[in-house]
Image: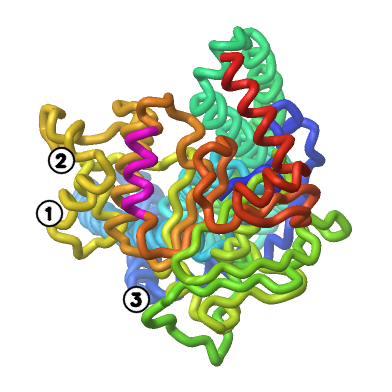
Amino acid sequence: MANENTPKGPGRHNRAMLPTRKPQNTKKTLLRLCKYLGQYWFLIVISLICIAFTTLGTVFATRLIGVAIDDYISVFDFAGLAKICIILLLLYSLSSLATWLQSYLMLKMGQNIVAKLRKEIFQKFQRLPLKYFDGTTHGDLMSRVTNDVDNISMALNNSVSQILQSILTVIGTFCMMVYLSVPLTVATLITIPFIIFATRWVAKHSRKYFKDKQERLGKLNGAIEEIMSGQKVVKVFCREEEEIKAFDGLNRDLLHFSIRAEIFSGMMGPIMTALNSMTYAIVVAIGGFMMVTGGAMTLGTISNFIIYSKQFGRPLTELANQVNAIMSAMAGAERVFEVLDEEEEMPDATDAVVLKNVKGDVVLTDVNFSYEEGHPILKDVNLYARPGQTIAFVGPTGAGKTTIINLLTRFYDIDKGSIQIDGQDIYHIKRESLRASLSIVLQDTYLFTASIKENIRYGRLDATDEEIKTAAKLANAHEFIRRLPDGYDTMLTDGGGNLSQGQRQMISIARAILANPSILILDEATSSVDTRTEVKIQEAMQNLMKGRTNFVIAHRLSTIKDADLIAVINHGEIIERGNHAQLMEKKGFYYNLYTNQFEQNEAI
C-alpha cells in the first residue's frame, strides 16, 4: 500500500544519475550457482562421460589421420587407407551421437535450474516487506526475473558444457602432443601465456561493463513500465516530448555501456585468431626444420601437430568467446541473488497465536514510527476503537493517515509503542491470521486479468457462485455485472481497464464483503468517483461496514459525519478527536477543514 509518506524508488528523470554499483564477489556468485548444478549431478556425470568420449575420440581420430599419411598414403596402400576411413567414420558418428546426448542433458538441466530460480525469486517477492516494493521500481524487478534469469539460462545451456569440453580437450590434446614430440609441444605452448593474459584482461573489464549494462537495462525497463502506466497523465499535460528526451537519456546510457561490454567481449575473437595463427606458423617452421635436418619427424606428425595446435588453441578461443555469456550470466546471477538475499518480513514470534472469533477491539498506545531514521512520521499516537465502531482519519496530505493503516496491517513495523487487537499485541499474532481478519478497500483498486467472478472470489477462494452473487448485490455491483455480455464471466483487461472507476470500486467492495473481515479499512474509497456513483458506493460500504470495526480515511468529510470517532491528524500527531458535532463545536482544525470544503462545494 503506497502512501504519502512512503519513500519511493528513484524518480524517472534521475535514474541515470545513480552511481554505478561495483561488481560483487564473483567467486561467491559462482559457488552459489554450483549449488544449483550440484542438484543435477547425475546428468552432469552422464554429460561428462559423453564429453570425454567425444573429446578423446576426436584426439584419437586426429592421430589416425597422421598414421594414414605416414603408413598408407605415402606408400599408396589404399586397402589400409580404407580401413582407417571406416574407423574414422564410425568414430565420428559415435562422437556426434554423444555430443547430441550431452547437449540434450545440459539443456534439460539448464532449463530446470532456470525454472527453479524463477520460482524462488517469485516466492521471494511474496515474502518481501511492502517497503521493498515501495523503494524499488517494478521495471527493475521484472528485469531481474526475465533478462537476468535468461542470461543465466544461456550460460547454463551452452557455457557449462563448453567449459567442460574445453578442459578435457586441452588435457587430451596436450598428452598426445607430448607423446608425439616434446619440442613441438613446447613450440605450441609458446603463445599460451599471451592467451591467458588476454583472457584475464578482457574478462576483468568485460564483467564490469556487463554488470553496468544489466543495471541500466533494469532502469530502462522501470522507465518504460512507469510511462506506460501513466500514459493518460503524460498526454493530459502534453509531456510526450519531455518523456521522449528522458527515455532517450536512459537509452543512450544503456547504449554506452552495451557498446563497451560488447567491444571488450568481442575483442577476444580477433586476439585469439591472431595468436593461433602465430602458433601454426611456429609449429610448421620448427617441424619442417626438424624434418629437413633428419630429425625424428614425419609429415604425418607435423600434420597431427598442426591439427592438435588448433585443437589445443580452440578450447581457449571458445572459452574466450564465452566471456560475453559468462560475464552477463555472472552479472545477472548477482542481481538475482541480491533479491533472494533481501531481508524478508519479520518472522512471527515463537509465541504468536492465531486470532479466533475476532471482536475488533483495537488499541494503539504511544505509537511512534519513521520510514527513515531521524524523520518521525507518527509521534505518540494513542487511539481506541471499540468493536463495531467507525473511526475516521482526516487531515492534510502527508499527515500520516495511511501510515497508521500500514502499521495496523503490519506492512511496516512500529519503532515504539504497541498495537493490540482484542487485547493481543499484533506482534504476538501470526501475520497471516492478522491480515485474514482485515480487509482493505483502496482508492486505487486493483483487479487482476481474470473474470469478474474470479476477481470477487479472490476475497475467499472457496466461495460458491451464489455467495459471489450475494456479495455483488450487497456491493451494488450485481446490476451492472448482469448487463455485461458475459456477466460474471466477463474477462477484465489489465487493472480492470474495461470498467469505469466506480464499477471497479464496487467489485473491490464485493471482494471485501466476501472475505467477511472483522476489521475493515477504507482508504479514500470514494474520492475518485462522481457524486451519483458515490451514492451507490456509499450504500455498498454501509452494507460492508455493518457489525465490523471500521477505519476510514476520507478527503470528502461529508462521508464521515456519522463516524463514531473522528481523529484529526497533522504532522504525525492526533491534534483533535471526537464525533462530527463535537469537533464542529470546538471550531478548531476540523471545523476549518469542513467549512472550507463545504464552501468549495457550494461554489461549485
Nearest the viewer among 60 and 590 is 590
Residue drawn at point x = 37 percent, y = 33 percent: 535
Give the labeled residue for mark 3.
Answer: 42
Which residue bears the numbered disc 2? 488
- Residue under label 1, please give it: 465
In this view, the residue farthest toward the front is 585
Image position, residue 353 (x, y; %): 48, 87
Distance from the alpha carbon under mark 2 to that under mark 3? 50 Å
The stretch drawn in magenta includes residue 42 = no
Point out residue 230 in the picture as x, y percentages from the top left corner. 53, 25
Q: Residue at x 42, y 41 (%)?
A: 445
Magenta segment's dominant SS is helix
First of labels 2, 1 by sequence position: 1
Residue range (magenta): 535-544
First in sequence, mark 1 or 3: give its number.
Answer: 3
Task: Report how far apart the C-alphas of labels 2 and 1 lie in the structure.
Answer: 9 Å
